[in-house]
Amino acid sequence: MLRQTLAAAALLLPFGLLAQGRDLPDFADLAEKQGPAVVNISTTSTVRGNQELPPGAEDDPFFDFFRRFGPPQPREYEARSLGSGFLISDDGYLLTNSHVVEAADDITVKLTDKREFKAKVIGSDKRTDVALLKIEAYGLQHVQIGDPVKLRVGEWVVAIGAPFGFENSVTAGIVSAKGRSLPQETFVPFIQTDVAINPGNSGGPLFNLKGEVVGMNSMIFSRTGGFMGVSFAIPIDVAMDIANQLRATGRISRGRIGVVIQEVTKELADSFGLPKATGALVNSVEKGGPADKAGIQASDVILKFDNKDVASSNELPRIVASTKPGAKVTVQVWRKGERKDLALTVGETPEERGSKRSQSKKAPGDAAAKAGLTLSELSADQRRELNIAGGVLVENAEGAAARAGIRRGDVILALNNQEIKSVEELNRLLASGDKARSVALLVKRGDASIYVPLRLGAN
């Protein structure tokens, strides 16, 4: 009987722990000591929509008149969201995810001692999903920063946050992988864990067993919307680099070299004579860009950048982005069966377009607003980055615009083959259009351009 009991216990414990006579880790001290440095973040934002008629209104004799001829009734309502964060200094600086505070009109930070403070956004970076906030408080307990480079796959880690609003909840698991690349997330080598992360945990800290923060919990992979055993954290060195730049200058400076790259497969490596599938294959080079000036050519395979090995194509954007603009570096490429070193001066990536809320233009009387569009002007740098002469940025799409398939981040280039240079021009053309017919909007989305039919009287 005793033998059966021991065998059952062995199945319940992680491999090797029972054989070594070790107990499972105790997280109680860590949670008690580090919990006060973790905060709960609640935000409110004003969302504008169109007031729907209440149920039964169709029985009113004037219903059909107002439905056909009455203007949409503006409606504003307050949207609330929850997230987590953690203090990085005793004078009130704290980190959270950019998506937690995006578009927030009001941000409240609640400490474990129940004190609440209004927070100011010092700056945020959508590309890494990191935001730096400040509250007016002093003598606060803050976290200790660890080194995610030393983190090992299989190591125990602990998350503290507010899933579904349950403050200071503690969950634990192990590091499943390091340096994960996710679609559209080229600047962050994510830490993958099996720590239970749910809505509300976003922006909270990931601790190692020393009680040091090694990551910021950011997202999960899920087919249901809830936790399924795969969660991702931003390495704390990436988050702190962003925070330090935001605190010092209020903006993020990233390097760029002006190339389009792809992964090197085994077949491509064989065709280029590479000993193994490594590096980043250059598809095209921006004319006049830093890579072009350095002599990099299409079909080159970048093997090293600034003495750092480029093991795969997804590593190159991170390495380049973390290099200071203006720095002179050596790039090693594979060309025609041999290695070649080139001198390159790193350029600077334009700032994220549409990141300033003050640029948004949407007034109740605007034709674009009536169609469900919130628009902003593109700066000269943004147009240069997109290689376009005109166009306006879609900040938000709802109503008729959303139903037509227009999305946030799209750039509207033309209306019925007439180029758009400004928000004012697009509003004028929309206002003069036939409300009984659709207009054709030429929309740039990523590297592709498509025509989208928008019916003006359908909102």
Image (spheres, rainbow, N blue to C red):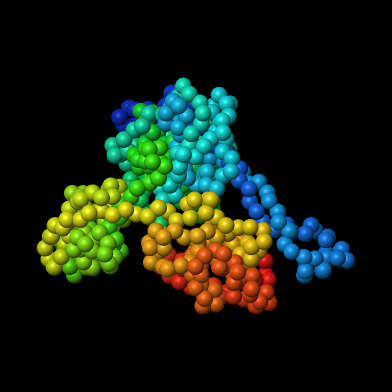
Of the pair 141 and 357, the residue shown nearer to us? 357
Residue drawn at 67 percent across, 74 percent down: 435
Give the image location of residue 443, x and y in percent.
Answer: 50, 69
Answer yes or no: is residue 162 visible: no
Residue 337, above or below 226: below
Left or right, 383 with reference to 59: left
Residue drawn at 42 percent across, 68 percent down: 389
Left or right, 330 with reference to 324: left
Left or right, 200 with reference to 144: right
Give the image location of residue 7, x and y in percent.
Answer: 39, 35
Q: Quadrant of residue 283?
A: bottom left
Residue drawn at 53 percent across, 61 percent down: 394
Left or right, 406 with reference to 208: right
Residue 178, above or below 68: above
Of the pair 219 and 344, the residue shown nearer to us? 344
Answer yes or no: is residue 109 visible: yes
Single out the residue that lies furthest toward the top: 139
